[in-house]
Amino acid sequence: MVEVGFGTGNALACFAEEHRDWDCIGIEVYRPGIGSLILRCDALGLHNVRVVEGDAATILAEWPSSSVRLAAIYFPDPWPKRRHVKRRLVQPAFVGDVARVLAPGGRLLMATDWEPYARSMLKTADGEPTLANEAGAGRFSERGLERPETHFEVRGRESGRAVWNLAYAKTQ
């Protein structure tokens, strides 16, 4: 399992605690978040979590193909200003790299509380030919039980924003 941009690591630690037989890898650039995850894993006695510090797009471009059963991208920075949209993580090339590293039948789970980004994520992931939208093309998913509630999810709901979930399976 790989979580891209795990923030403070709550979702990753919860997943790792529930799936102690899985290798769980988090990719993050935010050092305080990395420290928070390490402290939490130590407190929970988790030995199945590894951290890679750096840019996920660069890291996944070099990641071995068909080596991941689950990729998660929860609440990536929405870069809401029009001039910053190009900085968004979920772009066609990045989704292509995520699809490449997924094993056949592997899954990509994403969530955001920013509707314009959610629609962009949906269009981008639906456009990747090796991924099948589990809810049907052009449709959002329900939040799966495998995704713990995140800090950004709570904050978004408290601000009155809906949460948009996406789930895809690798078809080839």
Image (spheres, helix red, strand yellow):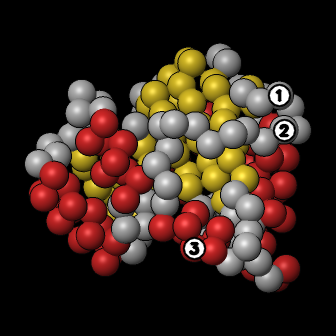
Q: Identity of the amino acid at label 1?
A: Gly
The picture places residue 39, in percent across and down from the top left corner, at: 17, 65
Circles 2 and 1: CB distance less than 8 Å? yes
Q: Quadrant of the C terminus?
A: top right
Taking 21 as reference, is 78 above or below it? below
- Residue at image location 83% in from the left, 28% down from the top: 136
Give how far apart the Cα atoms at labels 3 and 1 are: 28 Å
- Residue at image location 14% in from the left, 43% down from the top: 47
Q: Nearer the viewer, mark 3 or mark 1?
A: 3
**Mark number for residue 136?**
1
**Mark number for residue 139?**
2
Horizontally, residue 2 falls left or right of residue 135, namely: left
The picture places residue 132, in percent across and down from the top left corner, at: 74, 26
Query: Dividing the picture into quarters, in which one does residue 42 lie?
Result: bottom left
Q: Residues within 10 Å of mark 3 (few under 14, many from 20)?
A: few
What residue is pinned by disc 3? 155
Q: Residues within 10 Å of mark 2 (few under 14, many from 20)?
A: some
Near-viewer residue (60 or 34): 34
Taking 2 as reference, is 80 above or below it? below
Q: Residues within 10 Å of mark 1 (few under 14, many from 20)?
A: few
